[in-house]
Amino acid sequence: MSEQYHFQDIRVAEPPEPTAESRLRREMGQELKRLNEQLIRLDAPMDELESVRARLAELNEELETRDKRDYPQMLQRLLTGEGSRQDVLDVLDFEILTGRATAVNTPLELWLDGDRVRARGWYGLTYQGPPGRVHGGVLSLTLDMVMAKCQDFFTMKGFTGTLNVRYLDATPLESDIDFEARVTRVEGRKLFVAAKVFAGERQTVAADGIWICAQGDYIVRDEFAAMFTDEGIA
């Protein structure tokens, strides 16, 4: 990608090389994540808990007085093809789950593998539903991210129209969880996607959904043209 970026150039969970500022923001995000994990089950006397609360409140009050990035202006630059590398990083590094500068991200990595999107995640106590299990809503959110990456096969981007999730078995916390998604067919502005979730060899979730292109029909990128035909998936 060039040093000027358009929103259509951005691939899901694939930020460009970080700037020095973004590296620092990612380190801040990791410290916040560590803090959150420490506080979830903190066992301490009331006076110590109050001391921690007061210190956190003091930092929040200080930061509330600071200037914030103008997010609408950043998006406008990207929509007109005038975005900077820092603009792209500021969008992707703060995405839910995959953002590398947020306190709520998981160690979720996504990549293209032939005609598949694959991902691997790891969920701590922050994402617990039933005891020892990943919350189903978190898995649904992750699937939305993983399945949306199937749009990286195309030049256009769109939005989730339908997402159907079927929970087949428990998905454990604090384990490597694998995701697989693929395009099943394309119909003009509609992209049909299916996905699976695995804990080891055991499938725990199945999903299917439809993505709707925002600006017209989905157009396959040249490098992936052999995988798609007029009749559907090759």
Image (tube, grey):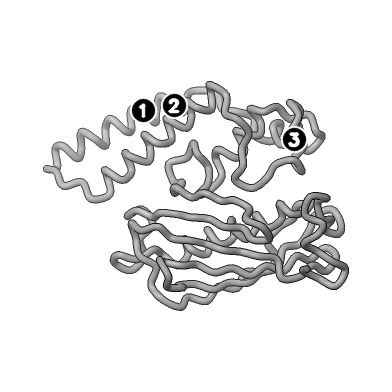
Name the disc covering residue 59, or none.
1
Label 2 near label 1: C-beta < 8 Å?
yes
Image spot of residue 142 (x, y percent): 52, 58
Quarter of the image containing the C terminus? bottom right
Q: Callout 3 environment at 10 Å: few (<14), some (14 to 19), or many (20+)?
A: many
C-alpha gap between disc 1 and disc 2:
6 Å
Q: What is the secondary structure assignment of the residue under circle 2?
A: helix
Please name the residue that numbered disc 2 is placed on.
63
Image spot of residue 233 (x, y percent): 77, 69
Image spot of residue 64 (x, y percent): 46, 28
Query: What amino acid is labelled 1 in the image?
Result: Leu
C-alpha gap between disc 3 and disc 2:
27 Å
Query: What amino acid is labelled 2 in the image?
Result: Leu
C-alpha gap between disc 3 and disc 1:
32 Å
Asked if residue 47 is positioned above or below residue 186 in the image, the reply reads above
In the picture, measured across the screen, residue 68 lies left or right of residue 174, that is right
Please name the residue that numbered disc 3 is placed on.
78
Using the image as rendered, state which of residue 174 and residue 70 is in the foreground: 174
